[in-house]
């Protein structure tokens, strides 16, 4: 009999320790929807590999330098050192442009996978006991991912970065009591400054990756400890039996195949799509600003909130509350807090404190279906609201009317969507409930 390969022996040993044959056993998910988390891990691996290479050539400095290189647009021009280093990576280093594109495309994939995975967890009830803590870890991973997106946008020090930085400075400055000292600490006394670039570099290259790896390790540990939710199967009692695939060769083969396919797709997209080619965006100049640029798409909901919510300026108990504070800090903070707190709200309302090992259909619980649909609609409307100026240009409609339409939509669309989801869930429940047996006929 042929001896197993070293890789097979390693996988067999891991399967006994942390896999399906461990004590307690772990479930290696079989459904394709569960591969969203694997896609996020693959994207993070690509981000790490490409990011380490890019970090060597990047310079986090706002000092002006003369660029001399292959870029005809900027050759001989005075540029911020950070922007010049990115141009040098893209134009002068062999394969540098492809490396940057793969890095940016991987960041998009990771955020899409994180958002989709979190929505799936909410919609199917995968957050229920004993996985409440792991849901909070997942929200933390999404916040770290948003931090990656924002700091990564700042580092090239483009005109887009200047717009995002000014928005952040306005939001920080609107915070009561701590706004001014926090702004001085994070941004400095004026823009542009080395402080913000060095801080963004430290976060993006060191602190956020460490946080992501730590949270990811905790997430996987909790998944292994409590097992992920499984689809309902009439032939298996998931409370006592763990369905799934063995680590070797099934799980290893599936993850290897997914890694290969996603890497190929990202490389192909990097060849075709100019992901974050900053040459045409222009460098950060303190004297230049524009309202026609937008931050990266994961932060659209903040920009949309700033653009469509009405102006507010009032003082309450000695604290000044402005529209920047409400739209830029309170509304996004409330949305994230509601996503994090929803499992506890549902447990309190339904009283369900039992251990759950199966996944629900998104329409099995009317309250959950309505809440998830409503929160998703709010995020979508706010994100679309970031493009009111673009819509005004395309539709040839005054921007004031577009803003008014979005304000109406922000109130009506989530309510209508939530009501429709609740109605659909109740109809599904009624259709699944067998009719009660007719009462026996009593003699006259």
Image: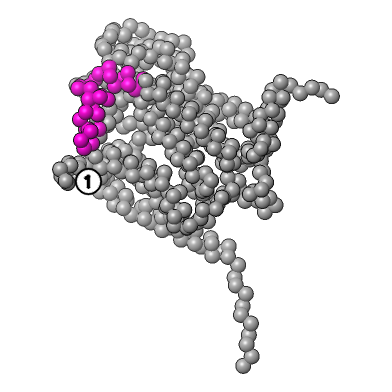
In the picture provided, is 295 more to the left or to the right than 130?
left
In x, y percent, where is residue 432?
58, 62
Quadrant of the rendered structure where residue 192 is? top left
Q: Residue at x 59, y 48 (%)?
A: 357
Q: Is residue 184 visible?
A: yes
Q: Which residue is mark 1?
A: 310
295 magenta-colored: no
419 versus 297 height, above or below: below
In x, y percent, where is residue 442?
62, 87
In x, y percent, where is residue 154?
33, 24
Quadrant placement of the C terminus: bottom right
Q: Is residue 251 visible?
A: no
Q: Secondary structure at mark 1?
A: loop
Looking at this view, name the residue that lies furthest to the bottom: 444
33 versus 366 height, above or below: above
Q: Residue at x 28, y 49 (%)?
A: 407
Magenta residues, start to end: 172-201
What is the magenta segment's predominant secondary structure? helix
Quadrant of the rendered structure where residue 85 is? top left
Quadrant placement of the N terminus: top right
Depth order, front residue of 193/238: 238
Looking at this view, name the residue that lies furthest to the front: 23
């Amino acid at each position: 009999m042929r001896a197993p390969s070293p890789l097979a022996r390693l996988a067999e040993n891991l399967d006994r320790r942390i896999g399906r044959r461990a004590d307690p056993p772990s479930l290696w998910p079989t459904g394709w929807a569960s591969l969203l988390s694997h896609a996020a891990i693959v994207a993070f691996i690509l981000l790490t590999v490409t990011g380490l290479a890019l970090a060597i050539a990047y310079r986090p400095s706002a000092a002006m330098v003369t660029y001399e290189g292959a870029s005809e647009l900027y050759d001989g021009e005075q540029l911020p050192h950070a922007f010049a280093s990115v141009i040098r990576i893209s134009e002068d280093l062999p394969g540098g442009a492809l490396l940057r594109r793969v890095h940016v495309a991987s960041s998009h994939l990771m955020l899409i996978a994180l958002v989709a995975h979190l929505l799936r967890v909410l919609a199917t009830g995968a957050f229920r006991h004993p996985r409440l803590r792991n849901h909070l870890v997942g929200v933390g991973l999404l916040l770290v991912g948003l931090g990656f997106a924002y700091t990564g946008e700042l580092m090239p020090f483009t005109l887009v970065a200047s717009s995002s930085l000014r928005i952040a400075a306005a939001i920080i400055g609107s915070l009561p009591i701590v706004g001014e000292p926090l702004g001085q600490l994070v941004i400095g006394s004026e823009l542009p400054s080395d402080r913000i670039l060095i801080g963004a570099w430290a976060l993006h290259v060191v602190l956020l990756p460490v946080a992501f790896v730590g949270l990811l390790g905790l997430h996987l540990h909790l998944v292994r400890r409590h097992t992920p939710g499984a689809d309902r199967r009439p032939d298996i009692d998931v409370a006592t039996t763990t369905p799934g695939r063995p680590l070797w060769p099934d799980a290893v083969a599936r993850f290897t195949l997914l890694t290969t396919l996603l890497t190929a797709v990202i490389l192909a997209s990097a060849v075709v799509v100019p992901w974050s080619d900053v040459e045409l965006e222009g460098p950060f100049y303190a004297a230049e600003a524009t309202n026609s640029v937008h931050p990266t798409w994961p932060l659209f909901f903040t920009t949309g909130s700033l653009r469509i919510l009405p102006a507010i300026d009032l003082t309450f108990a000695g604290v000044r509350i402005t529209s920047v504070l409400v739209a830029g800090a309170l509304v996004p903070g409330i949305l994230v807090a509601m996503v994090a707190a929803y499992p506890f709200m549902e447990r309190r309302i339904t009283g369900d404190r039992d251990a759950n090992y199966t996944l629900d259909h998104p329409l099995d619980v009317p309250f959950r279906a309505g809440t998830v649909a409503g929160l998703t609609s709010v995020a979508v409307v706010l994100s679309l609201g970031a493009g009111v100026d673009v819509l005004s240009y395309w539709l040839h409609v005054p921007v004031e009317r577009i803003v008014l339409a979005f304000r109406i939509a922000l109130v009506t669309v989530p309510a209508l969507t939530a009501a429709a989801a609740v109605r659909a869930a109740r109809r599904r429940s009624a259709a699944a409930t067998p009719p009660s047996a007719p009462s026996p006929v009593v003699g006259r």
